[in-house]
Amino acid sequence: MPLLKGTLDVLVLKALSWTPMHAVEISSWIQDRSDQRVVVDDPAMLQALHRMEERKLIVAEWGVTRNGRRARYYRLAAAGKKHLAAESERFVDHFDALLAILNTRKA
Amino acid sequence: MPARFGLRPGVRRLFRLPTGHGPAREEIDDELEAVIQARADALVATGMAPAHARDAAMRALGVPLETLRAQLHKSVEDRARRMRARDYLADAAHDARYAVRGLLRTRGFTFVVLATLAIGIGATTAIFSAVDALLLRPLPFAQPDQLMQLDLVAPDVGRLTGSDAMPWSYPKFAEFRSRQGVFSGLAVHEDMQFAVTAPQVELIRGESVGASYLRTLGVKIAAGRDMDLSFDAHPEASHEVVLGYALWQSRYNGAPGVLGTTIDIDRAPYTIVGVAEAGFRGLSGKAEMFAPLTARRGAGLAGAHSYVFGVIARRKPRVTLAQAAAATATLGAQINREFVKAGRADSAWTARAVPLNALRVSPLVRRSALVLFGAVSLVLLIACANVANLLLGRATKRQREISVRLAIGADRGRLVRLLLTESVVLALAGGACGIVFAWLGTRALSAIDPSATLGRARGNGFGAISFDSIHLDWRALAFIAGVSLLIGILFGLVPAMSLRRMSLADALRGGSAERRGTRGVSLGGRRALVVAEVALSMVLLAGSGLMLRSLAKLLTTDYGFDGSHVLALRVTSFPAGAVTDNFQGFWAGVTRELRSLPGVTAVGLGSNGPLEGGSGTSTIKSLDGVAMDADRSPLVGVGEANADWFSALRVPLKQGRMFDARDVEAAPHVVLINETAARALFPGESPIGHQVAAAGGMDGSATIVGVVGDVRQFADSAAPPELFIPLSQFGHQQLEIFVRTKQQPASLAASVRETLRELDASAALTDMQTMDERTSAATARARFGALLIGLFAATALSLALIGVYGVMSLAIGARTREIGVRIALGADAGRVRRLVVGDAMSLVLVGGSIGLGSAVLSTRVLQSLLFDLSTTDPATYITIALLLLGTALAAAWIPARRASRIDPMQALRTD
């Protein structure tokens, strides 16, 4: 299922609000939560992460995975928390409104 | 938007933080590797063989690894670049705000700089607009580069100069047209006044033209159709007229219904067949209607030696200028030879073809415009020097602030940008103010009446390019923007450069340059600027001095007549019924009635008047019965006049007798000649009693009965040879009348008008003016040029003096301590004043000498604009040198007096 513009950023931030993760973990987290309906390919994920890193929404650190491999872990920055709060509210509002319209039945 | 989340750019700048925050290249590579590894690990966990797992993970990326890596690198770098650009703009905006705040703090400084720039830029732009309109803009015709003017070329004969821009005769033109092969279209044209009766007679300016005239020029027809081309071949074929757009609008409200109707031109009905496109007013620039030449002049076109027609031609697209010119010269020479009767000496006349664009204005106007542009550019240069001077002074004062900034680690590049921004903001603001001056200037320039100012009839140049086409347009505004920007950058760089040289330690110790005194680096630069300013203004002063002296000479020249108390007017008679050739009764009545007005002492009538810009285009047919080859005759003017013409204008009789009662129509024909003609035709003997016949107006030979004084046709050139035949022996429909009165001539205007209306209501009265007005109009170009250059020179001088004053004040400020010591050691006030004034004068002398040298070299370009004056006229140079020294002395005196009042104790105590 293709994502609406700007949606991926919010999903990534939501994932990271749980705990710091690396790129592949974030992808699986989103895939699991959406019952495999939202699949993000790795190139898109990396672009999004780098973009948000530049914008200081997330901070990157190198760490070690459970398998003992090196990985670049991302955690939420203060600005990222604010952005997530604002954006998720906006998204929820938006989809609420859409649903209200789409679920309207003939009386 | 990102600034909301990151640091404010200002903060980042302050702490000199790097702009990029994305991952570095190696980090991207490592992370990509880690992701692939993690995917491969996952595949192995599902049971895939480790050897295949990595390949499968790579394939799962969807794009080749290299491509993805490059993409990721590029995105990061692009974003970093965008951020830097945003920072750069934010910096620029910050600098601009800072500059404006700083400039508002120092209002006096800002005002002086803005005023200086506004005057300099405004004046330059106004003159640029004039140069653009008069010299640069393409002619308002289709493919104007193909258009050429064809002239006959008459070589010099004896002591009389010929002309390289002679009009054509119709037979020669017709022959040329039928035999040439380089032009796609050719047409004759002649300025005309059309007497339109509807029902009152009204004189309307127009052109009598060949039928292909509008087509040749590429003028479109706004309504109706162009003239029938067959007119050219069949004289008097039909009477058709094409209206000018303006006349169509003003007289007929642009009604299409007027097409096909007839109007009476010179009492003959003409059918209106079309309207020319808006804006086109003929090559004369004044034509309101166009009528076929063949219809108007009919049989009058036969004279092979009657040279009155201009010829315009359009080059065929494949023919070069050189080919067209060569073909015209060859064929022209051939035709001129053929029109000389057999047995006579070959004609030496030829013809030439000149690009119309080269003739758009007369050479004098071209030169005037370029000289003025040069002069105004010098003013702008001086203005710039002054501004640079002020900016340098400001930079010196701010050295402490700047050194503090440097000390706490400000980037020199950023500081240079800050200083540059300030001067650019200043220059752009100055340019914006300059638009006002430019607008005023172009309005004044466009109001110049070219016919009065330029002596329109003279030599080359045609009316299609006129001063009223001068206006501020996008080109002028682009010019302003370009000049302002250039000035801003150039003069921002001067203080910025001094910053580069500044040593930090020196600067912090306290205002280095100020302390280094008169020999300090920046003061040295400022002194050099003042020297340059003085030199430049000297050049301008010299130029304006020469123009003014030339003008003074021109105004005191004897034009050969006395115009005070003379009213001039032109009267055209339209007798009821058919046009007759006998107007004697009408003119006798006019003379009688005007003569009876109170205060009138003489009523002169003539076909021409002084300073009208007409020049001799007739030729002598025979002298004492010996025929003269028409093409070898000197060019003479032939005019009709009555005896009172000479007394009204006080033109003296030098020899022989005046016209008198004996010279009635039936009597033997007589003629008066002017002194130039006497010298040219009868060198060393008295012309009285000799017989002369001339083409144009004269009917057979006439006896010379007297010699009269020369009367100038142009204010700045000697009279041509002229012949006067008595009005009493020839009829004329239109004459110029000169009324000499004891009162103010202008006060006579109303009663003259009234008298003429009572006499004959159908007669048209035009061009009424006092002879003093005419004299002043004839010298208008010289006065206009002298006035403008004088104005520029005055501006330049005052700017230079401000420069001298400014730099001396600063020098004294820097030398306060030294002067204090001198006073303490016993130097008296006079000595101190001499010291300062001497210092200033050394600058002025150096600048003045350089300027004098440059002026002698550069004022050569003025030679053709000067009247009877050498460009190295010593009196002018001595006067302006004294003027410069005198005013500079005054400018230096004020700071000198201040220096002499320095309190030594105070001076020594200041740190």
Image: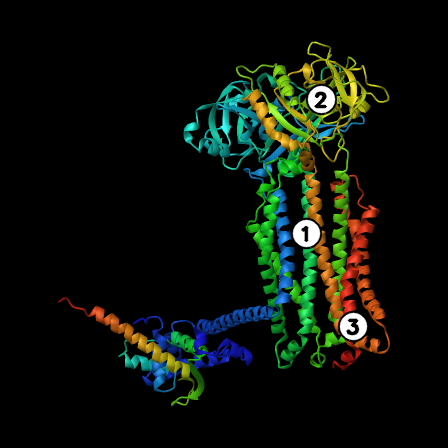
- Residue A67 coordinates in the image, percent (x, y): 39, 89
Label 2 or label 3, whichever comes before in sequence order: 2
Label 1 or label 2, whichever comes before in sequence order: 1
Q: What mark, if any, has residue B644 been given in the picture?
A: 2
Query: Residue at horizontal 77%, vertical 36%?
Result: B557
When the figure is inspected, residue B512 is found, relative to residue B576, above or below; the finding is below
Residue bearing the label numbered 1:
B376
Alpha carbon separation for disc pair 1 and 2: 48 Å
Depth check, mark 3 against mark 1: the one in front is 3
Categorize mark 3 by other alpha carbons within 10 Å: few (<14), some (14-19), many (20+). Answer: some
When the figure is inspected, residue B71 is found, relative to residue B323, above or below; the finding is below
Residue type at tag 2: Asp
Label 3 or label 1, whichever comes before in sequence order: 1
Residue type at tag 3: Arg
- Of the pair B503 and A91, the residue shown nearer to us: B503
Alpha carbon separation for disc pair 2 and 3: 74 Å
- Residue B863 coordinates in the image, percent (x, y): 76, 42
* SS at badge 3: loop
Disc 1 and disc 2 on one polypeptide chain? yes
Subunit that carries the residue with mark 2: B
Query: Residue at horizontal 75%, vertical 60%?
Result: B532
Residue bearing the label numbered 3:
B901
Residue farthest top in this picture: B666
Depth check, mark 1 against mark 2: the one in front is 2
Alpha carbon separation for disc pair 3 and 1: 40 Å
Which quadrant holds the N terminus of chain B? Answer: bottom left
Number of marks drawn: 3
Query: Residue at horizontal 62%, vertical 78%?
Result: B405
